Amino acid sequence: MGLMANQGVDVDTGCGVVAQAARTEAGAMNPTKTITSRQIVEQAKTYIGVPYKFGAEAQPGGYPVALDCSELVELVCRELGVEPRMPDGSGAQLVHCLRHGLGALNMDSAWETAGALLFRREAKSQRIVHVAISTGGGGTIEARGKQYKTVQEFKKRGGFTEAALIPGVTYD
């Protein structure tokens, strides 16, 4: 992909917020260190099997005892040194990606793009309620729930409604 795009464009996040998505070369935010989308996937794989706990907060420097979906994304980005820093909370993560990144990604492309983030918007409340990391080829790594823990899924699952690329990461 080697993503390079135009300068800022208004992007509707779907919840009445229009963010100015700054479009730039994906790795330009952290010019001293190139972080690739494959590194995002490989780092996320190191947490497969970690128990799920809603609201879990991983402590810097230690292996997490539990994760929720957005904490997995935040932890992976923090450990790799992704800049700008990824916030906690799946809704905040979508807005962050749209505001600082390359804009929204269509779902078909997202399933095939390793390191893309997949989001689920609840129909009734219109809130973003879940995030997963695409492994490319239709799979995900996600802190899915208490009965599942942090897992790698190898096929597409329904329910994901939106997708975006992580700012500061190079996608190829």
Image: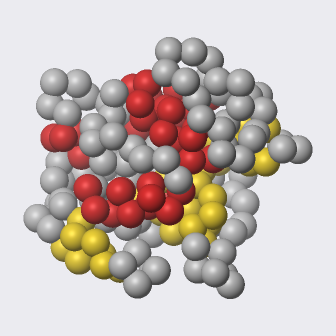
Q: Is residue 77 left or right of residue 27?
A: right
Residue in front for this viewpoint, 139 or 52: 52
* 84 to 116, vertically: above or below: above
Quadrant assignment, res 45 = top right
* 110 to 152, vertically: above or below: below
Q: Is residue 61 visible?
A: yes
Q: Position of residue 63 (x, y in %)?
A: 62, 17
Q: Is residue 64 left or right of residue 89?
A: right
- Residue found at x 24% / y 51%: 3
Q: Is residue 109 visible?
A: no
Q: Position of residue 28 (x, y in %)?
A: 16, 41
Q: Is residue 168 left or right of residue 130?
A: left
Q: Position of residue 83 (x, y in %)?
A: 27, 37
Q: Is residue 27 left or right of residue 139?
A: left
- Residue found at x 16% / y 24%: 32
- Residue found at x 37% / y 48%: 166
Q: How is the image coloured?
A: secondary structure
- Residue found at x 50% / y 15%: 61
Residue in front for this viewpoint, 66 or 73: 66
Q: Position of residue 51 (x, y in %)?
A: 78, 33
> The C terminus appears in which quarter of the rendering?
top left
Quadrant assignment, res 37 = top left
* 103 to 3, vertically: above or below: below
Residue in front for this viewpoint, 139 or 143: 143
